[in-house]
Amino acid sequence: RIPGPQALPDLWALCFKISDSQLTARLFDGLVSLAAAVPVWNIYRPLEFPAIDVTIDAVRRLAREAS
């Protein structure tokens, strides 16, 4: 698990960007709120199909522990 502020660069990289500064500011504010409200984990996994079961199991375990 990582702190919300540390997760922001990765979350930002995953967002669809719009060239409107007001919408960009709203998007960033929304990401800050999201990162403050929910647990965030970095999950490193091989980008290979055979690894998907292990990755899904890890996500399920983390979700159970968080609830």
Image (cartoon, rainbow, N blue to C red):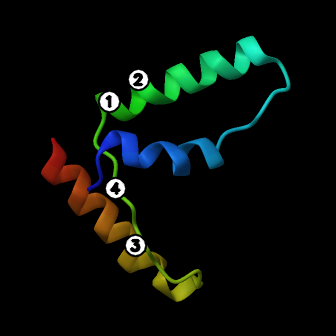
| Gap between marks 3 and 4 measured at Cα | 12 Å
Q: Are marks 2 and 1 in contact (CB under 8 Å)?
A: yes
Q: Identify which amino acid the numbered label 1 is placed on.
A: Ala
Determine whether the residue tagged by mark 4 lies in a helix, strand or loop: loop
Q: Quadrant of the C terminus?
A: top left
Left or right of residue 57: residue 28: right
Tally of numbered discs: 4
Q: Could you tell which of marks 3 and 1 lies nearer the N-terminus?
A: 1
| Gap between marks 2 and 1 measured at Cα | 5 Å
Which residue is under mark 4? 41
Left or right of residue 50: residue 23: right
Position above or below: 58 against 15: below
Which residue is under mark 3? 55
Q: Identify which amino acid the numbered label 3 is placed on.
A: Thr
Q: Are marks 3 and 4 in contact (CB under 8 Å)?
A: no
Percent from the top left, x then y, of residue 43? 40, 67
Determine whether the residue tagged by mark 1 lies in a helix, strand or loop: helix
Which residue is under mark 2? 33
Q: Residue at x 53, y 51 (%)?
A: 10
Q: Which quadrant holds residue 32?
A: top left
Which residue is under mark 1? 36
Position above or below: 61 against 30: below
